[in-house]
Image: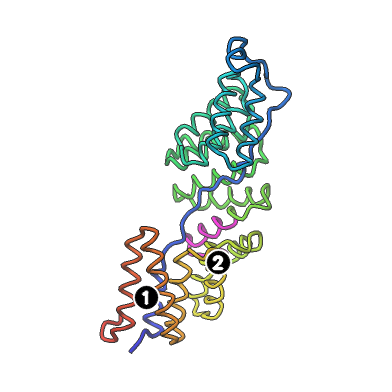
Amino acid sequence: MLPNKKAMRVFSKYLPSAPLTFMLLSASFIFASPSLSLSPAPLLLAQYAGKSAEDFLNEGLQAISSGKVSEGIAAFRLATKLDPDLAPAHYNLGLALRQVGQLQPAAIAFYQATQADPKFALAFANLGGALLEGNNLQQANDYLRKALEIDPKLGVAYYNLGLVQEQQRDCDRAIASFKKAVEFSQNAPEPAYHTGICYLQKNQPDKAKDAFRKAVKINPKYAEAYYSLGGIYLSKGKLQEALEAFRQSAQGNSNYPNAYYGAGLVFLQLKQYPQAVQVLQYARDLYKNLGNSQWASNTDNLLQQVSNPTSQPR
């Protein structure tokens, strides 16, 4: 026979985890402040045909706004050469480098921004974020706390600090940090989502559900949050709610394999086997395309169980 409720409880325990996102909440490029030094070195000015550091900074911002990241990086580098004290040039260089995945150079650029302006809270927060992505948790923690000393209402710093604490499995402190991030970055869904992840780790699914709902209210296309909601509903046997959550997850990101895998489990419980096979095969192919061989294999095993009644889990 095909999977019964007991078997489905076994399956639901092995839903793939939603990926943890280390997205910075505040990654906006900024212009130079009039209070910052804008006086370039005279010799360098001659080399660049009279353009000032601020000119190159603005050229870099225009390039970024047009999607020309490499040109933006080049312009920001020139701005920092002309005026090493121009903190926004270092900061924007860091954002652009992080955008193309160059974490170490990005961290260096953010650090240089903090040296140029020791009160630049966003630079400290983004430096902490870059170090977090590089798994340098202790230094990330130190710089994020420095950012909050400068600006106690900086939501991105609370969010990144919460991510550090989540990585350290200190869920109580992480939840407190994420709640502060929600307070000061009300349009960002990520803090609410990670609050939910922490509540799941604390085995408090009802609180997790409320947090995930808050995340999708802010961003109705938040695939990972809908998927996590689906997992909670599935574990409680609320199959229609689970299926709807997995469908919303797939609508939010049509290339998100976990959504189809979760829907497959629901279809199995509903004994809608052709639909189950269809979405599980789709999930398997997406896992393969994404290079996730483990879950491609897991999905294949589940498909074999569906087609071979003698190998059902007990």
- Left or right of 192? Residue 101 is left
Mark-to-mark CA distance, 1 and 2: 21 Å
Q: Residue at x 49, y 29 (%)?
A: 108
Q: Nearer the viewer, residue 54 or 175?
A: 54
Q: Say whether residue 164 is magenta.
A: no
Decide which of tag 1 and tag 2 comes sooner along the chain. Answer: 1
Of all residues shown, which one is farthest toward the top?
43
What span is in magenta?
192-208
Q: Crowdedness of circle 2 by 10 Å Cα count: few (<14), some, many (20+)?
A: many
Q: Disc 2 residue type?
A: Tyr
Q: Is residue 165 above or below residue 111?
A: below
Which residue, as the protein is rendered here, is positioned at the far front? 49
Relative horizontal placement of residue 277, taking residue 156 as reference (left or right) = left
> Farthest residue in the left direction?
310
Which percent across, then down, holds residue 36? 68, 22
Label 2: element kind:
helix
The residue drawn where x is 33% and y is 69% is 298
Q: Would you identify the image quadrant in which residue 39 lies?
A: top right
Left or right of 139? Residue 146 is right
Residue position marked by numbered label 1 in the rendering: 10
Q: Nearer the viewer, mark 1 or mark 2?
A: 2
Q: Amino acid at mark 1?
A: Val
Q: From the image, give the main secondary structure of the stretch colored magenta.
A: helix
Quadrant location of the C terminus in the rendered image: bottom left
For mark 1, does the 10 Å Cα neighbourhood hold few (<14), some (14 to 19), or many (20 or more) residues? some
Q: Which residue is more in the foreground, 82 or 258?
A: 82
Q: Which residue is mark 2?
A: 226
Q: Position of residue 198 (x, y in %)?
A: 51, 57
| Residue 204 included in the magenta stretch of the image | yes
Q: Quadrant of the N terminus?
A: bottom left
